[in-house]
Amino acid sequence: MNVALTPRENKSYIFEVVNDPRGKVQKTVNQITVNGATTEVENISYETKVKFSLEYFRRFGDVGLYGGLIENSFGFGADYYFLDDPGLKLNLQFWDFSSDDPLNDRVHAKATARYTFLEYLYVQAGYDNPFNRELDTAFVGVGLAFDDDDLKYLIGSGIGKATLGD
């Protein structure tokens, strides 16, 4: 989930919530002794964890720059806008420069191309975590975006009436 508060056309505050299946890393070391020889065996387990992002975004013409907390770690990124706005947007971001996960020992990066059509619908594709070969993933998706006028209408016509009637 992503919420962007945009007090001015070129400035936003972005809040995101992500459910990460590899969010919490736990390492345990067991010692096994066989015939007098002791060997250490490291076990790694993962737990799903909800992570948060809080970023400051600033747009300069066709380029947007942002930084802050990305999935519970410091990070930064950039957007480049093509065609008519919103049109096509390319995004590149970097975060989690020192992970506890041994399979994620390099910076976490993500590249995304997003095309918006019909004003509020978009399709996107990208590549996540390319520097950590055990975890790299291609992805595709579709989405729906709302602005405050849409939310005012939804809250005023649906939820607001239900609440007033009780």
Image: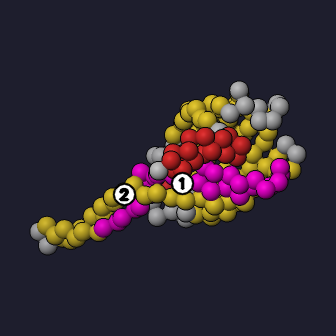
Q: Counting other residues with Cα less than 10 Å from the Cα at mark 2, is it few (<14), some (14-19), or many (20 or more)?
A: few
Q: CA distance from mark 1 to mark 2?
A: 16 Å
Q: Main secondary structure of the magenta part?
A: strand
Could you tell me residue 32's position as x and y percent? 19, 68
**Could you tell me the amino acid type at mark 2?**
Glu
The region drawn magenta spans 1-28
The residue depicted at 86 percent of the width and 50 percent of the height is 60
Disc number for residue 17? 1
The residue depicted at 50 percent of the width and 47 percent of the height is 165
Upstream in sequence: badge 1 or badge 2? 1
Label 2 element class = strand
Residue extending farthest left: 35
- Front residue of 149/55: it is 149
Q: Counting other residues with Cα less than 10 Å from the Cα at mark 1, is it few (<14), some (14-19), or many (20 or more)?
A: some
Q: Which residue is mark 2?
A: 47
Residue 12 forms part of the magenta stretch: yes
- Front residue of 123/6: it is 6
**Position of residue 51 in the picture relative to residue 149 (left or right):** left
Q: Is residue 28 above or below residue 82?
A: below
- Front residue of 164/144: it is 164
Residue 66 visible in this rendered orientation of the protein:
no
**Could you tell me the amino acid type at mark 1?**
Val
Could you tell me residue 141's position as x and y percent? 56, 33
Could you tell me residue 2's position as x and y percent? 60, 49
Could you tell me residue 87's position as x and y percent? 76, 32
The residue depicted at 71 percent of the width and 54 percent of the height is 5
Residue 64 forms part of the magenta stretch: no
